[in-house]
Amino acid sequence: MTTPATGPRLSVPAPFRDAPWQADALRAAEAEIAVPTMLAPEERQFYYWAARDWARGEGALVDLGAFAGGSTARLAAGAAAAGHGAVIHAYDRFTAKEQTKANVLYAAGVPPFEGRDILPLAQEFLAPWAAQTRFHVGHIPDLGWPGGRIELLAVDAAKIATTTDLIAAAFLPHLIPGRSLVIQQDFLHWSQPWLPAQMWRLRDHLRPVAFARRDTVAFLCTAPITPEALEGARIAEATDMELIEDIRAIRETLPEDWDLTRRLRRTIAALRANPGERIAWKMRPAPPPGS
């Protein structure tokens, strides 16, 4: 695969300029949502802002990788505050290992409990928004999408490259050009190099418009995502060098003031340190230079 010329750096569109999700009033409103999450503070604020200030109720809000409902709660609360009545779809296996329970749930004040099932906990946390929330329990590609337009698609379930392709095929064709956002929560996480590669291959359909620290980059749908576009964006069978070329290409077009060069260099280094690996939790960080 030959990487095309990258062209000039993209600029941030006006609605996303100056990171409005960091406004003091919005930060205070989001802080009232007491549902445990692994999202960083700015990421939590972006989810809330996207549902409240960007979404208009023209389609569903879809959360792929809801865990115990923290990200879903930010979407639901934002939609409720906006009053547009969008339905929120929460997808997950809704299970948690003991270490995750201890690090995230117990640390947030949830009393210890037996077993791995966290669906009842998520339902309890999301009870204030029960009327607008739909739960989808299981392996996301097996569950699919029941149909209808999607206005916000938050992705935190692309931990395997093959799953990433299946998620794209199931959900991306339902985006609304000019309106829908794809929130790639792990875009900058070094363990998932296939995500920036996939977004580069979809550059004629999805434009990067927002960066929320720690790892989230959001993309605006600019054109319908066709079967041909999906075929060209498949990354599960891509070689390490093809992924590296794609990451380098998107790195050179992201807005300069986001300052993401170092982060994406780390992603490339991790890919080189784990040749052929396409499962996030099997990836190991690259050793520091000179070690």
Image: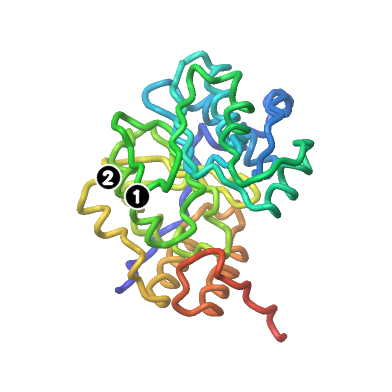
**Location of residue 237 (image quadrant):** bottom left
Mark 1 surroundings within 10 Å by alpha-carbon count, few (fewer than 14), some (14 through 19), many (20 or more)? some
Marks 2/1 in contact by CB < 8 Å: the verdict is: yes
- Figure coloring: rainbow
Q: Is residue 152 above or below residue 247?
A: above
Label 2's element? loop
Quadrant for the N terminus in the image: bottom left
Residue 210 coordinates in the image, percent (x, y): 53, 43
Q: Is residue 28 above or below residue 232?
A: above
Q: Earlier in the sequence, mark 2 or mark 1?
A: 1
Residue type marked 1: Ala
Query: Looking at numbered disc 2 in the image, what kind of residue is underneath it?
Result: Ile
Q: Can residue 46 be seen at all in this image of the molecule? A: no
**Residue drawn at (37%, 73%), measured in percent from left and top?**
242
Q: Horizontal placement of 266 versus 1: left or right?
A: right
The label on residue 183 is: none
Residue extending farthest to the front is: 114
Q: Secondary structure at mark 1?
A: helix
Closer mark to the observer between disc 2 and disc 1: 1
Q: Which residue is mark 1?
A: 168
Residue 214 relative to residue 53: left or right: right
Q: Is residue 191 above or below residue 217?
A: below
- Residue drawn at x 64%, y 34% is 45
**Quarter of the figure that contains the C terminus:** bottom right
Write down the residue under mark 2. Answer: 225
Return the x and y of residue 156 as percentages of the image width and height. 51, 48
